[in-house]
Image (cartoon, grey):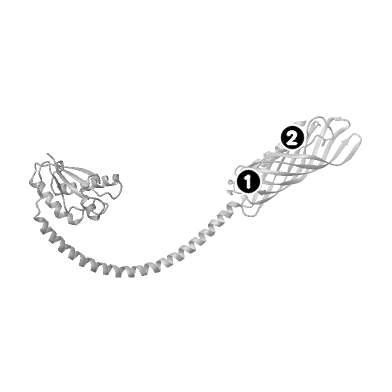
Amino acid sequence: MATRSYLPLVQFILLLSIILTPLNSGFAQDTKERWVFGIHGGGNLWIDDYNKRVFGEGGDLMVRYGFSRAFSLGLVTGYEGLKSKQDPALGGVSYVKLQAIPASVMGWIHFAPDKPFNPHLYFGMGAMMYKRTIHSNTGVATGQTKSSFHVPVGVGLEAFTSDDFSIALDVGYRLLDDHTDGRIAGKIDGYATAKVGVNFYFGTSAAEKRRLAVAELQHVKDSTDAEARRMKALVDAESERMKAQAEAEIKRIKDSTDAEARRVAELNARRLADTVLVLEKGKTVTLKGVNFESGKATLTWESEANLNAAFRALNANPDLNVLIVGHTDNVGSAASNRRLSLRRSEAVKRWLVRSGISASRLTVAGKGSDEPIDDNFTPEGRANNRRIEFRVLK
């Protein structure tokens, strides 16, 4: 007989599951900084000192506020019609009913605040005002209004159909004192409950505020970018005009400078063409006039004539092998200077190999600033220390 009393509640929960299962609106909700008002209805089973459980009606009114994405706090009140039977009658009592108004402060822990389906756990503490009606063999006795502590716990699920509306299902248990059924048998009373209802959301969530702020920033950025593009177009037009004028002047100066440079280069080439580089086994010869761009291993154009002299000397002495040694001044770290001097030696070797000298006759080394031939305190001294040497091998 007790099993039949539970049947309506089981059927009710199964029906709600069937209704909510296909619901998938795609709305993900953030409850932080939002007020929620809920209306829920359903039923209960009073667990007391009588032996027959009877399905009773109940409803809740809920208001809460989201303090974070995962936690809300609020107040729940409503009405519960708690019913119980006794068979056989006990002390002349065969049926008991409570007309109760509970009110509790409750907290909700939300497990999926960014999902369309948001399961939660709730708990709280409050009080319940009730009036007890007892049916007995002698008639009906109506009692006075009394109170009990009211401790709700349970789980639930919200399914969002929009940003401001959700369908809610809650199941749980409400712990009461042992006086609600009129009997003190050493067992604390309570009731199981299951309810379904709707929740209405008010205000703007923290996530929505962030989205609006980002949208406003984007609007400001777009406006600023448009103005920046307009100003850039004006500046670019003026820059192009000035650039054309500057390029014309630069070309004129460059043509004049190139002509003078070619004249000086031709003069130096004729002068250096008569230079004879003498190579002897075991001797070291400095290649004067072989220079590089500052801080690089790129040969300057004026080094060509001096490298030609080195080529002629190597070509005239095919039995000689040469160690090409690079040196730098002391500006910069010792390690970087050694790497730079080695790269400069390799640049000279590549030039000679391209000109026809066998690579097997040439080896390279980089000494950095380790072997100065002058002081490094004057520009002239540092220039003398930046050099390429041929060390003719025995």
Residue 204 picture location, percent across and down: 62, 54
- In-image side of 356 versus 76 (left or right): left
Image: 261 above or below 320: below
Q: Amino acid at mark 1?
A: Ala
| Quadrant of the rendering where the N terminus is positioned | top right
* Mark closest to the chain's N terminus, 1 or 2: 2
Secondary structure of residue under mark 2: helix
Residue 20 picture location, percent across and down: 64, 43
Reading the image, the residue beneath label 2 is 6
Q: Viewer-proximal residue, 74 or 49?
A: 74
Secondary structure of residue under mark 1: strand
Residue 347 picture location, percent across and down: 21, 48
Residue at point 30%, 70% (across, down): 245
Residue at point 26%, 45% (across, down): 338
Q: Residues within 10 Å of mark 1 (few under 14, many from 20)?
A: many
Asked which quadrant contains residue 194, the reply is top right
Q: Which mark is residue 129?
A: none
Q: Work out how far the residue at label 1 is from the one at label 2, CA to CA, in angstroms.
A: 26 Å
Q: Amino acid at mark 2?
A: Tyr
Of marks 1 and 2, the one in the foreground: 1
Q: How many marks?
A: 2
Reading the image, the residue beneath label 1 is 159
Q: Residues within 10 Å of mark 2 (few under 14, many from 20)?
A: some
Q: Viewer-proximal residue, 384 or 165?
A: 384
Image: 247 above or below 96: below
